[in-house]
Image (spheres, grey):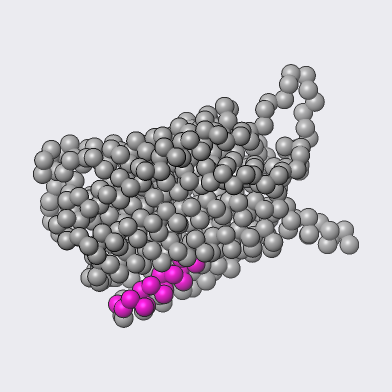
Amino acid sequence: MVDLTIDADQVAGRARMAPAPRHVLAVVTGNGLAFYDFLAYAYFAAQIGRTLFPAGQAGAQLLASLATFGVGFLMRPVGALVIGRIADRRGRRPAMLLSFGLMGLAMLGLALTPPFARIGMFAPALAVTFRLVQGFALGGELGASTAYLVEAAPAARRGFYVSLQFMSQDASGMVASLLGLFLATHLSETQLDAWGWRLVFAAGMLIVPVGLWLRNSLPETLEAPAAVGAVPTAEPAPLMPLRRLYVLGFLIIGCGGLISYVLTYFTTYATETLHMARSLGFAATTVVGLAGVVFDPIGGWLSDRYGRRAVMIWPMAVLVAAAIPAYVLIEQHRTAGVLLGLAGLLAAANNLGSVAALVAVTEAMPQRVRSGGLGLTYALGMCALGGSAQFMVAWLTQLTGSPLAPAFYLAAGGAMVLASVLAMPETAPTARRGRAHGRAA
């Protein structure tokens, strides 16, 4: 059994300087584009379903569209294995260039797919194909880019730098939601179904050339293998077997993804379940994204200062306690203030803890398997738990007829995260050194 190590700076054998801003921008831009594409599909699932899928009984097109959204998760483990292997053997930069290029291809393909009325079953077939390509690319993207940030950042600021990953995801989701809000306000339902949703994917393509150029200039952070005959560097004492870390990472990341995708379902939930104005649905997911932009870096900074465990545990406990009462209030009042305020509260709690969780899992992995190990853990968790979240919420809502189905699903996911986090060791270098000094005193 392989044991994990904690301090990447010790493995590297040197202190880290803060990475250049343009290098950080190159990494988080690619990650942001990946989630812009994925969340744009989630936001416009109803429109895509009515355009690219055959009509059937009530709700069938939405379920088919959400199932296609989920099918992209099936390729994430494959992408994590293939692109992660490239990142751990050839370097982080070539892996990130490959994933970014494939994401651009998938976005362009979906935006140009003709409607079902014109090409029949080729439309859903093409949609599925491009979601598989996108899932493959995203499966390799997060492991390589997060490993890069952990390795490039100073040890005492890893939490903050990795928080920029989540911040880019939430900012991109907010941009997609704002664009959706603008289109929903200025286009008719027919126009939005026919071509309005395509503009969102076409807009994302504008950043692809810039992102490829920025990533091509990145310095490599993967340590070169030791020369033949060289004395290997001693590794720090392990805190946990790697196999156990994979299991905990799977549960933490997978259930965390479940929570995130249930929150991004607010657009569909508000309009299709509560029959509120479409503009309010997009406004709710805009608030979810804004909460991430604000609270992601705060969560990263707090985890650098006070340790990963505390910042993982308390916000998640708040989310579990607040989920069901929040949805009860939203369903009873169905007003803009209640919807937006409680969506922001749930998102803030989720974002504060999510950053610390990703940092803890990432920095716990040895560099030699960090990109592939993190990518595979993330991909499997998202594939098994996150990718099906919106489909399951829609299906449970239709099955039970209860608008509170998302609340129970959200609370259950949060409880699983909380239980898994309690089994994780502290990985923040500052917090571990502080406890060591306290014991020595």
Picture coordinates of residue 84 (x, y %)?
A: 52, 34
Q: Residue at x 78, y 19 (%)?
A: 229
Front residue (pair 164, 49)? 164
Which residues make up the magenta segment? 334-348
Picture coordinates of residue 380 (x, y %)?
A: 46, 44
Q: In this view, does 236 lie to the left or right of 290?
A: right
Q: Which residue is drawn at 73% across and 38% down?
A: 11
Q: Is residue 7 left or right of residue 33?
A: right
User: How many tags in the picture?
Assistant: 0
Write down the quadrant of residue 2 in the picture: top right
Write down the quadrant of residue 186 in the picture: bottom left
Picture coordinates of residue 202 (x, y %)?
A: 30, 45
Q: In this view, does 189 lie to the left or right of 306?
A: left
Residue pushed farthest bottom? 333
Q: In which quarter of the image is the C terminus?
A: bottom right
Secondary structure character of the magenta stretch overall: helix
Residue pushed farthest right? 441
Front residue (pair 189, 346)? 189
Residue pushed farthest top? 228
Q: In this view, does 155 lie to the left or right of 434?
A: left
Residue 320 covered by magenta stretch:
no
Q: Quadrant of the N terminus?
A: top right
Write down the quadrant of residue 191 in the picture: bottom left
Residue 347 covered by magenta stretch:
yes
Can residue 144 be seen in the rendering of this structure? yes
Picture coordinates of residue 217 (x, y %)?
A: 55, 34
Q: Residue at x 44, y 70 (%)?
A: 344
Can residue 258 be seen in the rendering of this structure? no
Residue 11 vertical position relative to residue 296 in the rendered view, above or below: above
Residue 294 vertical position relative to residue 80 in the rendered view, above or below: below
Q: Which residue is drawn at 33% across and 52% down?
A: 40
